[in-house]
Image (cartoon, helix red, strand yellow):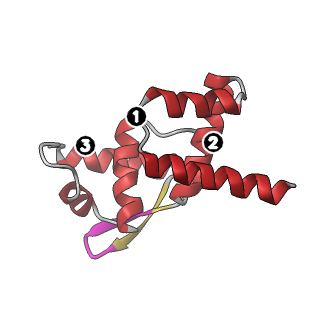
Amino acid sequence: MTDRLLTDAELELMRILWDQGEGTVRAVMDRLPPGRDLAYTTVSTTLRILQGKGFVTTRKEGRSHVYVPAEEKPRYEARSVRHMLGSLFGGDRVALLRQLIDSEPVAADELAELQSLLDDKLGNEQ
């Protein structure tokens, strides 16, 4: 698997494939948000680039190519966070978490879930 990260445009299409499990160019286009008008050739080219980078595989069905994610979303998320942690925060996990909590309003239920995750983590390591 590649160690590269996705561009914004590639990530947009990968999110659709992760949600759907697979898709043709047309199926991916149909799942784009309203007002996001990408040309068929743009989506097709981007999917072929993703294939070349190893992020998707393809199979032929009739005249269409079906694109399938080659990496699961949680694995890509973890790799992206590790990259951000190292490159932007110098490995300082507390700084990363502080930024996540301080940069945007956090709902009480989200804070409770975070507290539960921390409690579980502390309980499992003691």
Crowding near pointer 2: few (<14 within 10 Å), some, many (20+)? Answer: few
- Return the residue at label 2: 3
Q: Are marks 3 and 1 in contact (CB under 8 Å)?
A: no
Identify the residue shown where x is 32% and y is 45%. 45
Name the residue located 80 percent from the left edge and 59 percent from the top edge.
124
- The answer to whether residue 64 is magenta is yes
What amino acid type is highlighted by mark number 2?
Answer: Asp
At which x and y percent is residue 47? 36, 51
The three-letter code of the residue at mark 3 reads: Thr
Q: In the displayed structure, does residue 106 sit left or right of residue 117? A: left
Q: Residue 40, how many percent across, how many down?
A: 19, 49
Q: Nearer the viewer, mark 2 or mark 1?
A: 1
Q: Which residues are magenta?
A: 61-68
SS assignment at label 1: loop
Farthest residue to the bottom: give it: 62
Q: At label 1, which amino acid type do we have?
A: Pro
Q: Can you identify the residue that label 3 sits on?
A: 42
Q: CA distance from mark 3 to mark 2?
A: 24 Å
Magenta stretch prevailing secondary structure:
strand
Mark 3 surroundings within 10 Å by alpha-carbon count, few (fewer than 14), some (14 through 19), many (20 or more): few
Left or right of 101? Residue 14 is: left
Return the disc, 3 or 1, that comes first in the chain's sequence. Answer: 3
The residue at the point 54 percent across, 60 percent down is 72
Residue nearer the viewer, 52 or 13: 13
| Residue 84 visible, this angle | no
Instruction: Give the numbered dot on residue 105.
Output: 1
